[in-house]
Amino acid sequence: MRHRALTILIACSAFGAEPFEVHEATIASVHAAMKAGSLTCAGLVRAYLRRIEAFDKNGPAINSLILVNPSAEREAAELDRCFAASGLTGPLHCVPVIVKDNFETAGLTTTNGALVFAKYVPDRDAFQVRRIKEAGALVLAKSNLAEWAFTPYETVSSALPGYTKNPYALDRVSAGSSGGTAAAVAASLGLVGLGTDTGNSIRGPSAHQALVGVRSTMGLTSRDGVFPLNLQQDIAGPMTRTVEDAVKVFQAVAGYDPRDPVTAAAREHPVPDYAASLDRAGLRGATIGVLRQAYERDSTDPEVTRVFLAAVEDLRRAGAAIVDPARVETDPDKRPKGPCMGFKYDMNRFLADRAGRVPVASLAEIIKSGGFHPSAQRRLEVNERDPANGPDSPECAANREWREQTRQVVLAAMDKMKLDAFVYPTWSNVPRLIGDLNTPHGDNSQFFSPVTGFPAITVPMGYTRGGRLPAGMTIYGRPWSEAKLLRYAYAFEQATRHRRPPDAAPPLR
């Protein structure tokens, strides 16, 4: 009987039904199996499609995906043909990616979570989507988002009925706005994901679902082809289950893009080999500051604080010198009051650039259409009433001055204390119950990284509520220091191994 079972296993492998477990798979494990001949791209994609069928709208009904790419299996078959001819097509060969549905994706509807764009099919890819495809990846599905990327607190839109659930606790939020990407990647409905972060929308959902999320230096990564929320702060980037996978995706998407002027600065900062950051001893000799002002408040959950302080001790044991507290003399309340550019200005320009291809031409037409979630209506109307102050306005001049002053204060504090990075909990509170907008949300990340444009990475730091609810730690540093921050994140990850999969989406047998 044992011999017969082995024969069947070999035969199944020969005909494409590979005995490869995609649950918690990594890019490295996928490529190793392909090189060993035990996995095809078509087999990998079929395995993820089976998990999507089992868990996204059925079973726990995580409800994370707006659209599954109908061409995914055909694209996988083509990648298999290329692999047979010449091996891996790139560093992301056959990596099935979950893409937040505010990235334009050629041939696939791109909704920004809103019914008004339910039939919008772009004819070109957003820069980062094009980059991952050039590296060999394929878009497996488009994920739900907080409509218009308006809120970091929950993931609900008019393009997909109902809330996206947190797979670690199905009655809890996945955070927003990239909660669909986070929930799908956490549940192994895809290998890696792309999200966007204006205030906390990569890092918050990643923290809520035990993922690694990267918000880069402003100017290192392009936002071309991404629906805007506020281009002064919008960033796009990877959301993954491991630091190593985040490094591989980030390597593919970082760098200059002539279609996004903010990336002109990247020409003065050549993209390094981020794989060199994968050093288990990477925290030795680092000086890390505990940024208590980022998270300490009356409503901070004591369990989050306990988990974070244990993580700080883990940093110390891994070789870092800890400065606690490490204070920065900033005042978020001094933000200039007048609006500078922002949603109305940026969205109207985005739509004008696509005139004749998008169903509406302005924010005013969006409101008139009614094609949005009721919870978004007031914010849409408030934005429409606000003046569309352009970059040459006095309001924008004041805003730029304030941001530069904040940058200088942060750098001065780091210089004074000889810090390599700051750390703090990505959220001060546990994931809320779905529908609860009254208890403290605990979002700690709207100020330091978004205002300065300096990079921040969140990494799993442990669990609260009896080990049920994930919590994340943010590592925040100087501009263009991504290689250093990734090194710290990797060393911490390898020393602690906090990532574990959610029970709601186990391996399929």
Image (cartoon, helix red, strand yellow):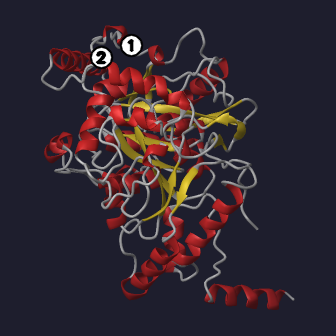
Name the residue at 33% across, 52% down.
274
Residue located at (54% from left, 26% from top): 427
* Numbered disc 2: secondary structure: helix
Rendered position, 54 above or below 413? below
Q: Is residue 232 left or right of residue 302?
A: left
**Quick check: 425 left or right of 251?**
right
* Rendered-image quadrant of the N terminus: bottom right
**Disc 1 + disc 2, Cβ < 8 Å:** yes
Give the number of callouts: 2
**285 is higher (above) or lower (below) than 185:** above
Q: Position of residue 140 (x, y in %)?
A: 50, 63
Q: In the image, what residue occupies the spot 26% across and 15% down?
A: 409
Task: List the residue tagged with mark 2.
Answer: 413
Crowd class of label 2 (few under 14; some 14 to 19; many from 20; radius 10 Å): some
Q: Amino acid at mark 2?
A: Ala
| Residue 143 appearing in the image | yes
Query: Looking at the rendering, in which quadrant would you find the C terminus?
Result: bottom right
Marking on residue 327: 1
Quadrant in the rendering for residue 461: top right
Q: How many angstroms separate mark 1 from mark 2 (CA)? A: 7 Å
Looking at the image, residue 207 lies above or below residue 115:
above
Q: Quadrant of residue 220?
A: top left
Q: Is residue 99 left or right of residue 68?
A: left
Locate residue 24, reporting x and y percent. Answer: 61, 57
Q: Residue furthest right?
A: 1
Q: Nearer the viewer, residue 59 or 17?
A: 59
Q: Position of residue 475 (x, y in %)?
A: 43, 32
Q: Nearer the viewer, residue 120 or 289?
A: 120
| Residue type for callout 1 | Arg
- Mark 1 or mark 2, earlier in chain: 1
> Observer-nearest residue: 216 or 431?
431
Residue 367, image x, y percentages? 41, 32
